[in-house]
Amino acid sequence: MNTGKTLFAQLMEFLPWKTFGRIVARYGGDDRVRTLNCGEQYRAMAFAQLTYRESLRDIETCLSVQASKLYHMGLREPIRRSTLADANEARDWRIYADLAQRLITQARKLYATEDLGLDLTRTSKAAVKMHTLLDLRGNIPSFIHVSDGKLADVHALDLLLPEPGAIYVMDRGYVDFARLHALHQAGAFFVTRTKSNMDAHRVYSVPTDRTTGIICDQSIALDGHYTSKNYPEHLRRIRFKDAEFGKTLVFLTNHFALPALTIAGLYKNRWQVELFFKWIKQHLRIKQFYGTSENAVKTQIWIAVSVYVLVAIVKKRLELDASLYTLLQIFSVTLFEKIDLKQALTIEEYKTDSSQITKQLNLFTF
């Protein structure tokens, strides 16, 4: 039981604080710091993300009216917006990036057995861009790179460490045959859409059942002077007619074992990435930054991502049925309540149908 502890304090107990301490020491985050250490900075920013605060002044005001509970939240004294602003500007953002990566590792293990419903048995002023690899088992971001907004999408592939056997689903903006061949050589698979100007010829076709939407399933070879050198092996091209929208899509993959419909289904799941970004913007307030320097922006992004993943970990460990969207809505209005965490997150009154709020943002349930 956690009688006497606020929900916020109970949530924070799921963080690996010893690991966080080692990360802080690695970057000297608390060196010569007298007020608002890295742990307190994280708690204040996590509170801001969970309760959708709009500004540093908003954070300061909301915490000041709960002064009697701050100590039990892990805050030794009231938060001053100037102090928090200085911390966001000066503390190395990599502290929070490393923490988020540690949580991502935990979450991916917890969600490793999630079923996708697919047959895979055969095998402000601050401009930033987030290049994200989303693990569809639990919708956990497994790779995130924050750039200055000028980095082309395709270059993000150079930053990936491919996992053998993994299937990378991406849009046409990532089609670069030299980079795709590097994924292939690493033992990974990819699924993408072809560009209209791709120069290739059919090597052979396999029979298809057009009633399923699969128009053709072909093995092809690239004919372009450079593309044929960059990717000298055969590729698989699948033409699919989406009966729901009446649109024809052409997929390109190096996976020859999976059924063609499964390839189409995998690409359809790429929409979860789009929903992830929409959810990030609208529910983690990434759209509104508390600072404009590169360090402050990256600090907020990584803390926001870590909070998102932390709630996903809590959902799995407490075996909660509610969606992450619903859990975050509950946290946003109950952080100062003194009630057992699992009890608070399973109260019947809170079990709302989030799809009635917005179907597009119901990211966390298939």
Image (cartoon, rainbow, N blue to C red):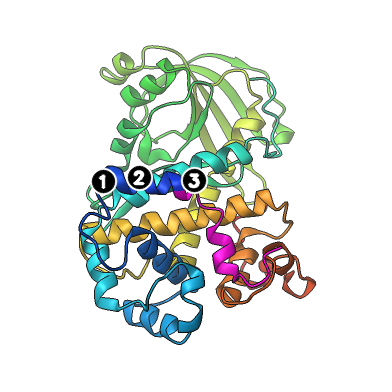
Mark 1 or 3: the one toward you: 1
Q: Residue at image x 59%, y 52%?
A: 312
Residue bearing mark 2: 23
Q: Residues within 10 Å of mark 3 (few under 14, many from 20)?
A: many
Q: Amino acid at mark 1?
A: Tyr
Q: Residues within 10 Å of mark 2 (few under 14, many from 20)?
A: some
Of residue 114 and residue 46, the one placed in the foreground of this image is 46
For the residues labelled 1 and 2, the Cα–Cα distance comes to: 7 Å
Q: Residues within 10 Å of mark 1 (few under 14, many from 20)?
A: some
Quadrant of the drawing holding the N terminus: bottom right
Q: Which residues are magenta?
A: 1-17
Mark 2 or 3: the one toward you: 2
Q: Residue at image x 49%, y 83%?
A: 68
Badge 2 element: helix
Q: Amino acid at mark 2?
A: Ile
Residue bearing mark 1: 27
For the residues labelled 1 and 3, the Cα–Cα distance comes to: 18 Å
Farthest bottom residue in view: 65
Q: Amino acid at mark 3?
A: Leu
Q: Are marks 1 and 2 in contact (CB under 8 Å)?
A: yes
Q: Is residue 177 magenta?
A: no
User: Splitting the image into 4 quarters, where does residue 40 fall?
Assistant: bottom left
Q: Position of residue 248 (x, y in %)?
A: 56, 41
Badge 3 element: helix
Residue bearing mark 3: 103
Q: Which mark is residue 58?
A: none
For the residues labelled 2 and 3, the Cα–Cα distance comes to: 13 Å
Of residue 264 and residue 4, the one placed in the foreground of this image is 4
